[in-house]
Image (spheres, rainbow, N blue to C red):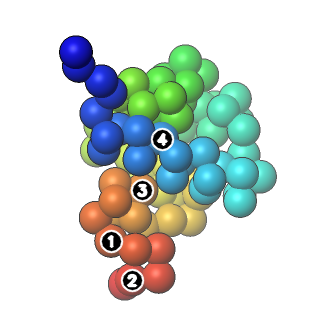
Amino acid sequence: MCGKDPYKIAFGRRLQTAMVMNGHNRTSLARDCYVCVQTICDYVNGETLPNAEVLARIALILNLDANWLLGIRGVNER
């Protein structure tokens, strides 16, 4: 039996946390990133990961390090 990819799940959790902390919901983030709401839902639900262009937009809009979203480094690491 295959489960969801743990990296995708972790990304989705980090994204959801960042959205809440920055006052965004799925609709507003989708609008600002020029993607469909379903795309943001897929990220949050751990179904898929964004491509580099969308990841960069998300990080810019949410004022985050993209590496943190991807789980490459901690939130306070620079």
- Residue drawn at x 61%, y 56% as measured from the top left: 18
Residue 21: which quarter of the image?
Answer: bottom right
Res. 26 mark: none
Residue that mark 3 sits on: 69
Q: Amino acid under label 4? A: Gly
Marks 1 and 3, Cα distance to the nearest angstrom?
8 Å
Q: Amino acid under label 2? A: Glu
Q: Find the residue positioned furthest to the front.
A: 1
Q: Find the residue positioned furthest to the right.
A: 23
Residue that mark 1 sits on: 73
Relative height, residue 28 to residue 4 (above, below): below
Marks 2 and 3, Cα distance to the nearest angstrom?
12 Å
Q: Picture coordinates of residue 41 (x, y %)?
A: 55, 25
- Residue drawn at x 40%, y 74% as measured from the top left: 74
- Residue drawn at x 31%, y 40% as measured from the top left: 6
Q: Residues within 10 Å of mark 4 (few under 14, many from 20)?
A: many
Q: How many marks?
A: 4
Residue that mark 2 sits on: 77
Contact between marks 2 and 1 (CB within 8 A): the answer is yes
Secondary structure type for disc 4: helix
Relative side of 73 to 35, left or right: left
Marks 4 and 3, Cα distance to the nearest angstrom?
8 Å
Q: Amino acid under label 3? A: Leu
Depth check: 52 or 38 in front?
38
